Image: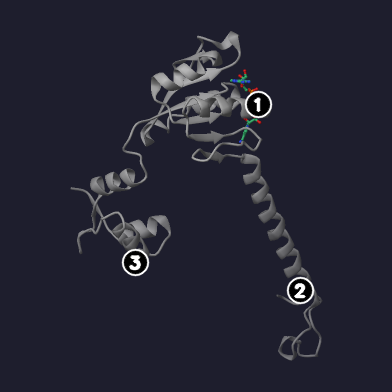
Amino acid sequence: MPTVSSEELAAAAGVNSAKLRKDFSYLGSYGTRGVGYDVEYLVYQISRELGLTQDWPVVIVGIGNLGAALANYGGFASRGFRVAALIDADPAMAGKPVAGIPVQHSDELEKIIEDNGVSIGVIATPAGAAQPVCDRLVAAGVTSILNFAPTVLSVPDGVDVRKVDLSIELQILAFHEQRKAGEEAAAESAAVLRAPKESEKGPDGDVPAVMPA
Ligand SMILES: NC(=O)c1ccc[n+]([C@@H]2O[C@H](COP(=O)([O-])OP(=O)(O)OC[C@H]3O[C@@H](n4cnc5c(N)ncnc54)[C@H](O)[C@@H]3O)[C@@H](O)[C@H]2O)c1
């Protein structure tokens, strides 16, 4: 039976092992002193807590560049998400397979949701189409939406929306880059401006032109 210790897991995740043990205790997972955690059982417990032991049928609406890339991503299935259907408004796409799944026309949206018992919808349409698509998904019974379109969706109470915006992530990185550059520039000017200490002067009382920081 493969096991793993809280120290090993804590080191891999970059967190404190006592905190990790406490967090796992909320899962009802206590491990065995000197042995650690049974890996298979721990994976099951975490998956169960995250709702991943279930099979979640998901529909993707808007099968352009992004929708096709999402459909082709192999990582969903291993985490309990099954792409049940691909939906697009373009009649020329109907029946064409993407990632081995034939694209269905959006006229069929309500029937597809009902037939597959879908509760999670992914929107990858242009911004202008996102709200009407969202309204149809919700009316058909979808209660969770992952929105990639650059628009804020309004939904009734009881419907969850998560928005993914990669440009915001890039903007956050750019902000940190700018701050790092500012800190470096400030450190350089501080080094230039810092007055020499007595001990930093040479034997004749001379000082280097630029003092080290
Ligand atoms: N969130 C992010 O980080 C991120 C990154 C890239 C793109 N996007 C956004 O994702 C969306 C898709 O981008 P793309 O490059 O794949 O665009 P795209 O033009 O290649 O694809 C859009 C698809 O949506 C379909 N469509 C249009 N109206 C529809 C409707 N009412 N119902 C169903 N399908 C419909 C079109 O036929 C097309 O196939 C855009 O809104 C874009 O801004 C977001």
Please say if 169 is above or below 36: above
Estimate the spatial distance between the alpha carbons at disc 3 and disc 2, rounded to whole Å: 41 Å
Q: Earlier in the sequence, mark 1 or mark 3?
A: 3
**Which residue is located at x 23 percent, y 47 percent?**
41
Asked whether the beta carbons under mark 1 and mark 3 sit within 8 Å of each other, the answer is no
- How would you rate the neighbour count of disc 1 (Cα within 10 Å): few for under 14, some for 14-19, many for 20 or more? few
* Residue matched to label 3: 18
Q: Is residue 67 left or right of residue 3?
A: right
Amino acid type, mark 2? Ala
Q: Position of residue 6 (x, y in %)?
A: 30, 60
Determine if the C-beta at disc 1 is less than 8 A from ligand 1. Answer: yes
Q: Nearer the viewer, residue 186 or 76?
A: 76
**Which residue is located at x 45 percent, y 18 percent?**
112
* Residue matched to label 1: 126
Q: Secondary structure at mark 2?
A: helix
Amino acid type, mark 1? Pro
Q: Is residue 77 left or right of residue 158?
A: left
Q: Nearer the viewer, residue 91 or 139?
A: 139
Asked whether the beta carbons under mark 1 and mark 2 sit within 8 Å of each other, the answer is no
- How would you rate the neighbour count of disc 3 (Cα within 10 Å): few for under 14, some for 14-19, many for 20 or more? few
Q: Earlier in the sequence, mark 1 or mark 2?
A: 1
The number of callouts visible is 3
Q: Secondary structure at mark 1?
A: loop
Q: Nearer the viewer, mark 1 or mark 3?
A: 1
User: Residue 190's mark?
Assistant: 2
Estimate the spatial distance between the alpha carbons at disc 1 and disc 3, rounded to whole Å: 47 Å
